[in-house]
């Protein structure tokens, strides 16, 4: 492991480094891996940490490579994956996987629960292994900066956060329109999602059967399902007895100890597009609005507002996130098409409305003869395939940790602002809310005894 640095030295070094955001152009290139060239025709030895759920979904795109290890705290997930990859070694503890197979592995795919992402990812980067991690990149702000800095120290490692829509044709065309000035300088952007998994008042919950209303942390202990290693599932989170309200997923990410609700989950997808198109990084201020803060569970209905300063030739922008019953004024008054999830960019020359799969310039009458800019981004082979190619020295990933870390930080800051009840004035160099020292405990959480990130 590299030498330990002070927290202040680490943070200042990472924040002061160049922006380094992935250029987004898919080009052929060469990259040296592990001190030598990796032939594009050779196969990577990949370990899967998290073999069910999203991890299971990533097995097929990686099946052209050598799947050498399968790890999951729930043994039925391992057995399911092992039917397709019977020669892979099996583990329930990723720490043992690294200890026993560290020299045999070229790359890892991490799809554990959010609260253990950083612990599964950091050792891989530090030992020169390429990493694909599911969104959100980490459970918190400090952890995202830790992984970003580790990737900077190991530039030959190909990293990628699983934002599948970042590789979509629709997203690339939207970015090209915004960055070419089709609607002029964008001073306002709205992002909304229908999903609202989390806690809400009993009154709000009457019409939403999926929500948790007055649920507190259950005190009763239920039998642990066969094959589930509950202590390993908890990992660095505070100890508690098993209850089916946490497992299986995605029940867990409503709870602050394991996730940050809808914002950190869907925010990774939906906020990605304006982050990319508007070249955003660190906000100046963040404010969160929702129901009274629940000590255990993230809110179902929630709104957050960010203020970003000018970036190059792009003007300052106000960025607002909405989930559940919260909606932009233009959606509430019916002046926009009723899309369930969407982005609205408001520029000096017009507006752009987009979702994951479609977009339109508004007002349509004004843009009926508009000539689109030439494509700047070539077609992606897909988020996972893009990462595999980059690991072999061909091209680069589009959602690497240099890009994904600020996006992850911003998403978590919205929840922190809501929980402390203040409009945060953000200092990205020192990872501090200048006007809210009480936010420190949420920026960097305490870990359960026996768990430590070795920076």
Image (cartoon, rainbow, N blue to C red):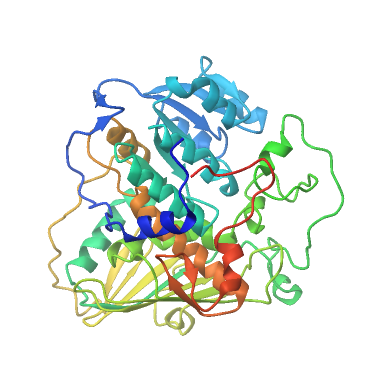
Which residue is the extreme one toward the top?
A: 87
Left or right of residue 151: residue 378: left
Q: Is residue 414 above or below residue 232?
A: below
Residue 100 or 305: which is nearer the viewer? 100
| Residue at the spot 51% in from the left edge and 63% down from the top edge | 412
| Residue at the spot 39% in from the left edge and 53% down from the top edge | 404
- In terms of image quadrants, where is residue 228? top right
Can residue 163 be seen at all in this image of the molecule? no
Q: Is residue 305 above or below residue 89?
A: below
| Residue at the spot 50% in from the left edge and 21% down from the top edge | 101
Left or right of residue 44: residue 450: right
- In terms of image quadrants, where is residue 451? top right
Residue 334 screen position, x and y as percent: 44, 82
Left or right of residue 92: residue 216: right
Residue 3 screen position, x and y as percent: 45, 41
Q: Is residue 230 above or below residue 173?
A: above
Residue 394 or 384: which is nearer the viewer? 394
Q: Is residue 96 above or below residue 285?
A: above
Can residue 378 be seen at all in this image of the molecule? yes
- In terms of image quadrants, where is residue 13? bottom left
Residue 299 screen position, x and y as percent: 63, 68
Residue 332 screen position, x and y as percent: 49, 81
| Residue at the spot 65% in from the left edge and 58% down from the top edge | 254
């Amino acid at each position: 492991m590299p030498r330990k640095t002070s927290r202040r030295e680490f943070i200042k070094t990472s924040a002061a480094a160049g922006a380094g955001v992935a250029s987004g152009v898919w080009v052929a290139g060469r990259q040296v891996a592990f001190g030598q060239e990796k032939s594009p025709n050779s196969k990577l030895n990949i370990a899967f940490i998290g073999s069910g759920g999203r991890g299971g979904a990533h097995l097929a795109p990686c099946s052209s490579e050598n799947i050498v290890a399968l790890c999951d705290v729930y043994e039925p997930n391992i057995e399911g994956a092992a039917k397709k990859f019977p020669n892979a070694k099996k583990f329930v503890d990723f720490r043992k996987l690294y200890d026993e197979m560290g020299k045999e592995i070229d790359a890892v795919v991490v799809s554990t629960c959010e609260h253990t992402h950083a612990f599964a990812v950091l050792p891989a980067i530090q030992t020169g292994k390429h990493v694909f991690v599911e969104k959100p990149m980490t459970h918190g702000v400090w952890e995202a900066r830790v992984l970003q800095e580790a990737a900077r120290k190991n530039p030959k490692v190909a990293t990628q956060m699983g934002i599948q829509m970042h590789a979509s044709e629709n997203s690339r065309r939207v970015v090209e329109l915004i960055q070419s000035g089709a609607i002029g300088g964008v001073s306002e952007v709205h992002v909304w999602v229908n999903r609202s998994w989390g806690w809400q008042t009993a009154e709000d919950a009457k019409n939403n059967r999926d929500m948790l209303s007055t649920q507190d942390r259950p005190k009763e202990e239920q039998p642990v399902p066969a094959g589930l290693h509950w202590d390993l599932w908890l990992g660095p989170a505070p100890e508690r007895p098993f209850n089916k309200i946490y497992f299986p997923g995605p029940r867990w990410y409503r709870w602050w100890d394991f996730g940050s609700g809808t914002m950190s989950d869907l925010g990774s997808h939906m906020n990605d597009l304006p982050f990319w198109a508007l070249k955003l990084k660190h906000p100046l201020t963040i404010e969160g609005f929702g129901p009274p803060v629940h000590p255990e569970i993230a809110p179902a209905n929630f709104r957050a507002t960010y203020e970003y300063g000018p970036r190059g030739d792009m003007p300052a922008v106000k960025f607002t996130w909405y989930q559940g019953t919260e909606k932009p004024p233009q959606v509430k008054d019916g002046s926009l098409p009723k899309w369930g999830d969407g982005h609205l960019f408001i520029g000096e020359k017009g507006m752009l409305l987009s979702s994951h799969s479609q977009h339109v310039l508004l007002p349509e009458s004004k843009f009926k003869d508009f000539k689109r800019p030439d494509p700047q981004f070539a077609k992606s082979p897909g988020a996972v395939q893009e990462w595999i190619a980059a690991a072999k020295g061909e091209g680069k990933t589009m959602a690497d940790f240099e890009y994904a870390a600020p996006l992850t930080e911003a998403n978590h800051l919205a929840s922190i602002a809501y929980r402390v009840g203040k409009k945060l004035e953000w200092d990205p160099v020192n990872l501090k809310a200048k006007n809210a020292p009480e936010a420190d405990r949420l920026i960097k959480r305490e870990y359960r005894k026996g768990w430590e990130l070795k920076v």
